[in-house]
Image (spheres, rainbow, N blue to C red):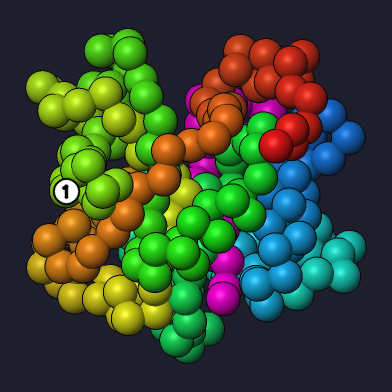
Amino acid sequence: MKCLILAAGYATRLYPLTENFPKPLLKVGEKTILDWLVEDIHTSGLVDEYIVISNHKFAHHFRAWADQHTLPIAVVDDGTSTNETRLGAVCDIQFAIEQKRLDDDLLIIAGDNVLDFSLVRFIRYAQEKGTSCVMRYYEADEKRLSKSGVSEIDENEVLLSLEEKPAQPKSHWCTPPFYFYRAEDAKKIKTAIADGCGTDAPGSLVAWMCGHAVLHSMEMPGSRYDIGNLESYQKVQESYRGIEK
């Protein structure tokens, strides 16, 4: 299994902190955001390579970080240098697949989220289901729903649909940016892009995949801290206590 880490964004809402430095390498407590993620995932013993998908502006920062690790980490530079010319998450995923000639099961994660639970639980869930999988969490706030990927789930935890930033949400289930794609489904991503799948948000790929594969949705067993601006970064710094479960 390969782990693709989406880290090609420019985090403009966190300026000046991220004007010349990538958000995933900001520290939360004693570790960078990426360290919290990859060190946890590696305890599963199932990932044989971590592939950071970066833009050109920040690729050297990620390479310096990777050089400090004993873990098998590669950095893929998507060649973009500005927020306006970014490829978008879905095209970045396909770019990495082609650059690395991947033919593996893929764990795909956003590199800028902090979790208080272990992602190994999600990997185990995907193994048990034998399908591509996503996670979900309950969101009561209607305003937040309209800015999220909202999903419909059946009684067997099968994902029926996902809609990005819906005007009229069909449920209170939000889908965070952590995905598991079986190798056979990862091969469909190029077709999804050609078919007009949205390419900016990674949830758009999930929305397309719902009609072309079986996906299960695991209820998130803890909390996710999305560092979107300076205020949220400060709150995480003050409250985060590490992976608890």
Quadrant position of the C terminus in the picture = top right
Which of these two is toward me, 119 or 245?
245
Residue 136 visible:
yes
35 falls in the magenta region? no
- In-image side of 218 versus 209 (left or right): right
- In-image side of 28 versus 173 (left or right): right
Which span of residues is magenta-colored?
Answer: 1-20
Residue with the mark numbered 1: 160
Residue 227 in the image, given as x and y percentages of width and height:
58, 28
Q: Give the residue drawn at x 21%, y 67%.
A: 213
Which of these two is toward me, 59 or 67?
67
Which of these two is toward me, 119 or 17?
119
**How many numbered marks appear?**
1
- Could you classify mark 1 by the number of other residues whose Cα lies within 10 Å: few (under 14), some (14-19), or many (20 or more)? some
11 falls in the magenta region? yes
Residue 56 visible:
no
Quadrant position of the N terminus in the picture = bottom right
Rendered position, 16 above or below 121: above
Residue 39 in the image, given as x and y percentages of width and height:
77, 55
* Secondary element type, mark 1: strand
- In-image side of 164 versus 87 (left or right): left
Q: Give the residue drawn at x 35%, y 67%.
A: 131
Type of amino acid at the residue the image marks with label 1: Leu
* Furthest residue toward front: 155
Residue 216 in the image, given as x and y percentages of width and height:
32, 54
Q: Splitting the image into 4 quarters, where does residue 38 fall?
A: bottom right
